[in-house]
């Protein structure tokens, strides 16, 4: 993935911030849109309900006003009182024809209370002085007149649904009174077909207008299946507004809204209801002339109050503004931030390459100007420090070269001294005497870890026989070599005192001599002065050898059997005195081996463990039948192979010998 530059990161942060802000605005805006849509739907429902209310109010009010004027006409009143007057009759016909033409459906009726005669005219029945029939109190069909005759209201309106014609007609009955005395009944009737057609036309998605009566029965509805055919006979909830609602809470809300609308005059009352499984709005306004309620039902999930066509242009404008903002911001970042930082980066690379004669200039009193000044100060300090450092390095180099020459001179002197010490140490080894007295009956491996070491081997010959042994002094290198000189002196001194025939007594005296040579208080806790020693006395007469050791064991093999003779557990010069005993061993047919711990403890192999006693014993058994020279070569080869790349850890000494009673060397 390519590394983002500062410009890209800045633009990304700005874009992310804008998108995050847009997300928050969208969430909040959507919440406001939802609330606004509901509020808009409520306002729309109120306005739509009020509009439908005016649609029905206007024609009905007009017909009521015309009917009242017709009933209150002086000509009509006079004719009802003197219907046999031909002059008044002609005047009534002329007056009534004018009203007949003005009524919406060109229909009128009038009843003369004195005679009970009923006059009716419409488009199919011409106006005449001949009554249609005479009303009778005994006729149940005429009960409407006699019930109206008893009222004191200025007019009465009846709604009648014609089952045959499938039309709804409204009859307006206006009492005719002269000086307070009831003299007749006049009025008109008209169909609501035109109003219903206008009421139901141009339906808006999600908005359903309908009309209910005072009992909640649906009188007019776009869905004819929901309309009750007869208001007087259909009293069940089916066919009423309550059948449209989902729960009792909504029904109670509607009942309360109807009562509130009835008492609020022409004001619209709106409530929320559960209908069709979701929230909807219902608005009510009371129409007292017909005792009806004009209702508007708004489905919030389907109504399209909010103009969604504005969303895409608004989003497009916002995206364009965002892109323009990113371009302007990117240019500003490039001009004010990226370019100076790039110049600073180039100057820093120049300094990193070793050229310190650079400067960084950015005008202004802002942070970049401060950074420019700080960088120039830093570059100047780097130049000064570099120059001072170079001068100090030159001085220090000269001092180191001088010190190096002194060290090399001292090292050459020390090396020469150590080489000379090595010659001295080798000169005390009894190689010449052992070759002279023992010949091929012995073999020695002596490998100091350093130029000089702490291991050596001894040989002494007397009239009684001769003494063989190996010594492992504590330490190696120069300290070990110095210890060898002390131990060698102690051995020579002790041999003079007790001879060589008793190795155990000799070890004890050597131990005492070493302790007397050293300041025990100084060396006890600071310097290791102990030594591991193994001694073998070989007499001139007899078929045995005598062994005694201090932590150096003696191994023997006759080619078939293998034995190990343990030494004393304490080294010479140890903090605690050791006990040493002599062990007489057979001479003829046996090969004997003594080794210092440098051989046995040498690390190597796959797991970097020590060579070990078991591997050493196996090596003895495998090579016991060979000549001592061949055995020494085999031992040395096995050790080198086991060591591999591991360094030598300690001084190594291995002494091999075999004698026979008939050996000419004895």
Image (cartoon, rainbow, N blue to C red):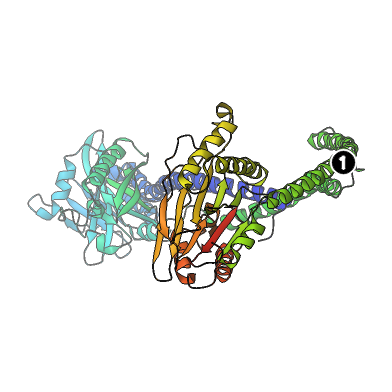
Residue 267 in view of the camera: yes
Residue at the spot 43% in from the left edge and 66% down from the top edge: 557
The residue lying toward the viewer, choosing from 354 and 373, is: 354
Q: Quadrant of residue 200?
A: bottom left
For disc 1, the neighbor class at 10 Å (few under 14, some 14 to 19, many from 20) is few
User: Left of 195 or right of it: where is 376?
Assistant: right
Residue 405's spot in the image, x, y percent?
86, 43
The residue lying toward the viewer, choosing from 456 and 322, is: 456
Specify the farthest residue to the left.
138
Residue at the spot 50% in from the left edge and 47% down from the top edge: 27
User: Left of 461 or right of it: where is 146?
Assistant: left
Q: Quarter of the image containing the N terminus? A: bottom right
The residue lying toward the viewer, choosing from 358 and 460, is: 460
Residue 463's spot in the image, x, y percent?
55, 53
Q: Which residue is mark 1?
A: 397
Residue at the spot 29% in from the left edge and 41% down from the top edge: 257
Specify the farthest residue to the bottom.
626
Q: Is residue 625 above or below residue 541?
A: below
Residue 6 in view of the camera: no
Q: Is residue 179 above or below residue 485?
A: above
Q: How many callouts does the rendering have?
A: 1
Residue 290's spot in the image, x, y percent?
28, 47
User: Left of 99 or right of it: where is 353?
Assistant: right
Q: Quarter of the image containing the C terminus? A: bottom right
Specify the farthest residue to the top.
521
Q: Is residue 541 above or below residue 384?
A: below
Q: Quadrant of residue 226?
A: bottom left
Q: Is residue 262 above or below residue 218?
A: above
Residue 258's spot in the image, x, y percent?
27, 42
**What secondary structure is found at the residue carrying circle 1?**
helix
The residue lying toward the viewer, choosing from 163 and 268, is: 268
């Amino acid at each position: 993935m390519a590394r983002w530059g500062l410009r890209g990161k800045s633009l990304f942060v700005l874009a992310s911030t804008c998108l995050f802000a847009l997300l928050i605005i969208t969430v909040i805006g959507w919440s406001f849109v939802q609330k606004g849509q509901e509020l808009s739907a409520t306002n729309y429902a109120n306005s739509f309900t009020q509009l439908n209310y005016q649609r029905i109010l206007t024609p009905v009010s007009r017909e009521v006003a015309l009917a009242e004027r017709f009933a209150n006409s002086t000509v009509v009143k006079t004719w009802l009182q003197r219907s046999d007057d031909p002059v008044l009759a002609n005047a009534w016909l002329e007056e009534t024809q004018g009203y007949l033409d003005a009524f919406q459906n060109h229909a009128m009726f009038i009843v003369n209370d004195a005679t009970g005669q009923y006059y009716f005219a419409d488009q199919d029945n011409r106006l005449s002085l001949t009554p249609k029939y005479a009303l009778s109190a005994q006729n149940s069909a005429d009960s409407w007149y006699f019930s109206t005759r008893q009222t004191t209201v200025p007019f009465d309106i009846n709604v009648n649904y014609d089952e045959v014609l499938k039309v709804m007609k409204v009859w307006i009955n206006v009492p005719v009174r002269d000086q307070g005395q009831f003299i007749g009944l006049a009025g008109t009737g008209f169909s609501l077909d035109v109003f219903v057609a206008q009421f139901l036309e141009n339906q808006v998605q999600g908005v359903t207008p309908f009309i209910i009566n005072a009992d909640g029965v649906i009188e007019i509805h776009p869905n004819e299946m929901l309309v009750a055919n007869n208001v007087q006979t259909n009293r069940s909830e089916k066919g009423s507004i309550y059948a449209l609602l989902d729960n009792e809470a909504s029904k109670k809300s509607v009942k309360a809204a109807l009562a509130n609308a009835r008492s609020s005059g022409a004001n619209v009352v709106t409530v929320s209801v559960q209908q069709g499984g979701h929230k909807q709005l219902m608005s009510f306004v009371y129409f007292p002339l017909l005792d009806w309620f004009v209702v508007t039902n708004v489905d919030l999930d389907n109504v399209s109050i909010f103009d969604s066509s504005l969303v895409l242009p608004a989003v497009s404008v916002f995206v364009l503004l965002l892109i323009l903002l990113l371009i302007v911001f990117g240019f500003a970042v490039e001009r004010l931030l990226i370019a100076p930082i790039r110049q600073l980066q180039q100057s820093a690379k120049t300094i990193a390459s070793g050229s310190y004669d650079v400067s960084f200039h950015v005008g202004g009193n802002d942070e970049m100007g401060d950074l420019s000044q700080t960088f120039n100060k830093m570059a100047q300090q780097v130049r000064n420090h570099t120059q001072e450092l170079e001068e100090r390095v030159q001085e220090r180099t000269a001092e180191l070269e001088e010190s190096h020459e002194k060290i090399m001179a001292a090292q050459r002197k020390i090396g020469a001294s150590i080489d000379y010490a090595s010659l001295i140490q080798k000169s005390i080894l009894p190689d010449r005497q052992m070759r002279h007295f023992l010949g091929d009956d012995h073999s020695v491996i002596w490998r100091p870890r350093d130029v000089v070491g702490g291991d050596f081997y001894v040989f002494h010959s007397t009239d009684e026989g001769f003494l063989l042994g190996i010594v492992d002094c504590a330490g190696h290198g120069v300290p070990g070599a110095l210890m060898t000189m002390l131990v060698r002196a102690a051995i020579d001194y002790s041999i003079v005192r007790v001879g060589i025939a008793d190795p155990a007594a000799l070890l004890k005296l050597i131990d005492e001599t070493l302790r007397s040579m050293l300041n025990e208080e100084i060396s006890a806790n600071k310097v290791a002065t102990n030594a591991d020693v193994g001694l073998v006395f070989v007499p001139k007469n007899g078929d045995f050898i005598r062994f005694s050791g201090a932590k150096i064991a003696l191994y023997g093999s006759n080619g078939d059997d293998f034995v190990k003779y343990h030494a004393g557990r304490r080294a010479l010069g140890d903090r605690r005195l050791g006990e040493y005993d002599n062990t007489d061993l057979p001479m003829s047919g046996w090969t004997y081996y003594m080794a210092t711990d440098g051989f046995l403890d040498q690390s190597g192999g796959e797991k970097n463990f020590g060579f070990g006693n078991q591997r050493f014993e196996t090596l003895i058994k495998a090579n016991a039948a060979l000549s001592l020279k061949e055995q020494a070569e085999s031992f040395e080869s096995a050790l080198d192979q086991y060591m591999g790349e591991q360094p030598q850890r300690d001084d190594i000494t291995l002494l091999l010998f075999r004698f026979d009673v008939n050996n000419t060397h004895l």
